[in-house]
Image (spheres, rainbow, N blue to C red):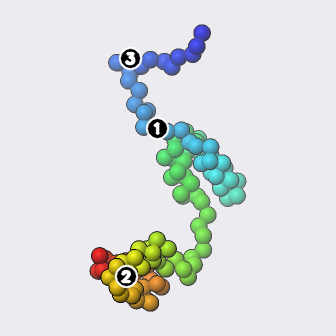
């Protein structure tokens, strides 16, 4: 006989449709973090994908700041260069060293 899920009745409807199970990759990453930092992985985090994601965000190792953190992304640079070609002008050199400056140049040239 096949095992069928328990039918919910009108008296006790299930309200856990929004809870998604933890992915295998999430669990592996969380266990690696817990082992490296000697922190326990709570059972609540193991039961819900959102809770696991929040636990990972709170406990994952942070990378050291880099001097390139404020540089524009490659997509941002490519977009600015496309705009510059269309408008037959150059992107100012200082925009290539500051993400916000590049953003302002793009906004002002759209």
Q: Nearer the viewer, mark 1 or mark 2?
A: 2
- List the single residue furthest toward the bottom: 93
Q: CA distance from mark 1 to mark 3?
A: 20 Å
Q: Mark 1 or mark 3: which comes first in sequence? A: 3
Q: Inspect this view and state whether residue 40 appears.
A: no
Alpha carbon distance from label 2 to label 3: 63 Å
Q: Residue furthest top?
A: 1
Q: Secondary structure at mark 3?
A: loop
Instruction: Determine whether, in the image, residue 97 is placed left or right of residue 2.
Output: left
Element type at marker 2?
helix
> Which residue is rendered at x = 50% and y = 74% of the image?
74
Lower sequence index among marks 1 and 2: 1
| Residue drawn at the location 51% of the way across and 52% of the way down | 54
Task: Give residue 80's position: percent from left, percent from top.
Answer: 40, 78
Q: Say whether residue 33 is left or right of residue 67.
A: right
Residue 103 picture quarter = bottom left
Which numbered disc flags the more N-terminal residue, 2 or 3? 3
Q: What quarter of the picture does the N terminus occupy?
A: top right
**62 w.r.t. 35: above or below:** below
| Residue nearest the observer in this picture, 69 or 8 | 69
Disc 1 to disc 3: CB gap under 8 Å: no
Residue marked by disc 3 = 9
Structural distance between the alpha carbons of marks 1 and 2: 47 Å
Proximity of marks 2 and 3: CB atoms separated by less than 8 Å:
no
Give the residue pinned by disc 1.
19
Label 2, on which residue? 84
Which element type, helix, strand or loop, lies under badge 1? Answer: loop
Q: Residues within 10 Å of mark 1 (few under 14, many from 20)?
A: few
- Residue at 55% of width from left, 44% of height from top? 45
Asked whether residue 2 appears in the rendered view, the answer is yes
Q: Is residue 11 above or below residue 62?
A: above
In the image, residue 47 sits, relative to residue 3, either above or below, namely below
């Amino acid at each position: 006989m096949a095992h069928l899920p328990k039918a919910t009745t009108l008296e006790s409807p299930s309200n856990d449709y929004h809870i998604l199970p933890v992915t295998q990759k999430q669990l592996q990453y969380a266990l690696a973090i817990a082992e490296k930092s000697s922190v326990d992985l709570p059972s609540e985090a193991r039961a819900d994908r959102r809770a696991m994601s929040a636990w990972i965000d709170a406990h994952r190792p942070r990378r050291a700041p880099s001097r390139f953190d404020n540089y524009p992304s490659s997509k941002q640079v490519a977009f600015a260069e496309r705009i510059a070609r269309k408008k037959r002008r150059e992107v100012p050199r200082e925009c290539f060293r500051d993400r916000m400056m590049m953003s302002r140049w793009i906004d002002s040239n759209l």
